[in-house]
Every structure is written in C-alpha cells, then in structure tokens.
Image: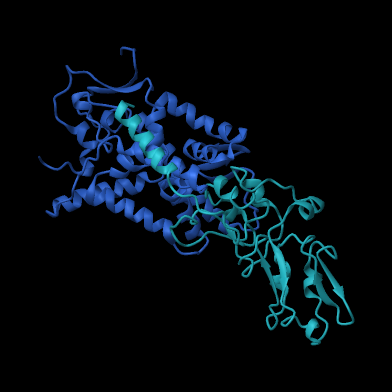
Chain colours: A cyan, B blue
Amino acid sequence: MNRRGLLALAAGAVSGLLVRRPPAVAGELRPPGALSPGTFERACIGCARCAEVCPTRAIRFPPGAGLSAGRPFLALRESACVLCMACTEVCPTGALAPIPPVPARVAAEVRIGVPVLDRKACLPWNGQGVCRLCAYVCPIGPAAVELVGPQQAPLFHPEGCVGCGLCEEACPEEARAIRIRAPGGGA
Amino acid sequence: MRLLRPWDVTLRRARGYVRVRRAVLSVSVLTVIGTPFLAARFADRSWPAGVFVGATGAARVLGMEFLDPLMSAAVALAGGARPGLLAAALPVLLLVLVLGRFFCGWLCPYLPLLAVSNSVRWALGRLGIPTLDLRLPGWIRFAVLGAVLGGTATLGVQLATLVYPPALLARSAYRLAFGLGLGGGATVLVAIWLFDTTVSRAGFCRSLCPGGALFTLLGARSPVRVRREASRCTDCTVCDVVCNLGQKPMTDVLDAGCERCGRCVAACPTGALSLSLEGTRR
C-alpha cells in the first residue's frame, strides 16, 4: 500500500470514529447465552449459523437492510425456544456464550427475557376455570411459575425464569395472556 | 476494439491451476447455498452438524473453526477480542500472506454473480447499449475499509456484515432456504451487482469491498506473482481484457489487487504469462 492508501485508510477510520454512538438498545429478545445489549452487537457478525441450527426456527433476522439487519432475535410469539443450546454451541464469535444443555446450567445462566402476565386475560385469574398449561410446559418449574389459589392461577417469578417462551406458546388462543419481554424493558 | 466474447477465453494453459481454483470456488459456493438448505431440510439435526456448520465466511469443519479475517478484525476492534477469533482467522490469514488477495478469486461466493455481470456487460455491448467502466482511484477501497472498521468500533455494531457480499449472500441463502423471503441483504447485493454491471466492471470488488481492501493490504508482500516473458508476448491484450480487477499483465502493471485467479495465465495464447514465486526462474 502506498502513502495515499495509508492516508485513505486513516481518513476512513477517523471518519468512522467520528460517528455518534447510539445508546445501547434493549428491547429485542436475543437467543440464549447472548452477551449483554451493547456488547452483543459488537460481537455478532450475522453469520446466521444460530438461526440455521435452531430446531424450532425461533431465531430470525430482521427483513431490512439497516443497522440491525445482521442481528438475530427470537420470535417467541411464533415459536418458543426449547433450550437445546445448539445456537450457543455453533456461534463462532462468542456473541452467544456457550452454555451446555444441562438443566441446572440452563436454569442458572439463560435469561432471554422476563415473563409478563396479563391477569385480565389469564383464564384462572378471571375465574374461568383451571388451566395450568403454562406451569405444565415450564421446563424450570415452581422457581419460575407457581400455581396459587383454588383456581391454580399462575404466579410468575421473573428471577427464576429463563424466558424460553414455552408458556407464551402454550397459553390458550382465547387468552394469550403471557408475553416474554426483553430484560431491559421494551418489546 | 472488438469486444472479447466470454467463450473466447478458453483454457489454453494452466488448466490444472484453473481447475483447482474452480473446484475450490465450487465448494465455497456450495457451502454458502447448500448448508442453509440442508439445515432447513434436516431440522431435527439428523444431518451431521458435527461435520460441517456454516459457510465460507464462518465455517466449522470437523470441529475446526474457520473465520474470515475481516470479521475477526472487526470483532476484535469492536472490543470483542478473544483468542479463538485469531486462531479461527489464522488459516486464511496465512494463505493471504503467502498468496496475496487469493480469497477474492478462490473463495468469494459473489464470483458466480460477477461472472453473470460480465456476461451481461458483454451482451449489452453487443446490443449497442453502452455500459460505463468507471475506474475509481485505488485508495477508495482503503478509505472504505477504514470507515467500516472505525464505524464498527464507534457504533458498537458490526458494519462489515451489512455490506460484505459473502456475509450478505450467506444470510440471503439462509432466508431463502427457510422460506423467509429475500430481505434487505438481497437488495444490497442487487445494488452491488447493478453497480458492477452498469457502472464499473467488478467495481465493487476492486474499489469498494472492505474484504478485498483488507486482503490487498495483508497480501501486499506475497511472493506469488504473475510474470510475463516479454519475448513470447505478442501484445494481444487478452490478459488485460480477461482480468476482472483491472490488472494489466501485458504491460507488467500489476499490484497487490491481483487475486491470483490465473485467468490471464490460462488465457494467454502464447504462454507468455506464468504464476510463479518471486525470485525464481523457470
């Protein structure tokens, strides 16, 4: 490379460094093992390997061409994560930190999001009968969702929940009372 | 000047070299297109993901990780450096140091699209529709590389994956295989292809691709060069015409932008060109 090339490289780098840094955004649900918002975006190269190995196809990429186009997110409304940890195993850059598919490790380390229950829509909370589906499908158990009262209504414990979305998926069509939200708030 | 037709460029010499390159390129393109389709077909992972995962830009073969040096550099500069990253980039990095910018001619999955672009350019020429062949100054690619890496470091968002054809192709193939439509990455690819087809032949590869710029930079000291034996050269210009990247072997004007594809060597009617190690005589 000649002197002009070196100058161009330096000029390009400086112009790149002058870009205003946007605030770290929380809000998207990332695959399990994802580094914290702000760090994840630095490490993820958008190779789509995580999405390719996802058995439930819960990992998606935004359809656009913008800054977020290369970043996977979880479409838990459409299909839940079954916590197989295959995505963390194939990630080439460690943007998804490897977590072995061991129940204890998964329960302790995976925090995709937190469950938010709409009690106005939840059947047992409205006295519309016993449902228990969310607790039945929950891979974590009472540490994440407890059934309380005569109607066996669900009581979620966000601190114990991994946010896999199996309950969101299982929640009956007429209720759809559960939504997994990103840990930092938002979507 | 009479336009050279695509089929005029027969493999006169160096057939072995060109065949090896084509085989390697085919495997590379197959991984980019094939892996997502296999993954979509065998969603239960009965297909051995332990054997092969990913594609050219980020592949894992038999448990060994291979990563594009551009991506390794971008992640490291953005503050995500870890030892595995450099180790994964090392095989390609070493090859680039020895072979120069070979990635572009041997592995880049955009090459088939570029071949189509060249054929369309030729067809348009035959139909009397003019196509531009703008030659952007050589320093622009380094400015682009600097801006992409610098921007990645400041924005904290990987930018290379949004403009780098191998990454765009891998994501587009994944979207297609999983029935998600083509998406914005394909739009960027179409824009790149249209630029190459109507504005500047292989102009993106030559002047705008951050990967091409990085490999040009890293491979600048490569000892593998195209050499011309002046006594056998008939000044026919075929070598200059077949080169995608604007190198001019006929007048010995070659720089680090040469991708060592061997097209010029294979096309030379008199065998005046050869790819050889610098400092050796044949």
State whether residue B191 appears in this view.
yes
Residue that protrudes farthest toward the bottom in the picture: A128
Position of residue B103 measured from the top left corner of the image (x, y, whole percent): 41, 35
In the image, residue B272 sits, relative to residue A73, either above or below, namely above
Position of residue A4 measured from the top left corner of the image (x, y, whole percent): 30, 30
Image quadrant holding the N terminus of chain B, namely top left
Image quadrant holding the C terminus of chain B, namely top left
Residue B173 in the figure: left or right of residue B136: right
Q: On the image, which quarter does residue B190 sit in?
A: bottom left
In the image, residue A20 sits, relative to residue B279, either above or below, namely below
Which residue is at a point 11% across and 41% down the rendered structure image?
Answer: B2
In the image, residue A85 sits, relative to residue A152, either above or below, namely above
The count of marks equals 0
Position of residue A8 measured from the top left corner of the image (x, y, whole percent): 33, 35
Residue that protrudes farthest toward the left in the picture: B1
In the image, residue B127 sits, relative to residue B238, either above or below, namely below
Q: On the image, which quarter does residue B23 sit in?
A: top left
Q: Nearer the viewer, residue B234 or B85?
A: B85
Residue B132 in the figure: left or right of residue A165: left
Which residue is at a point 56% across and 39% down the rendered structure image?
Answer: B79
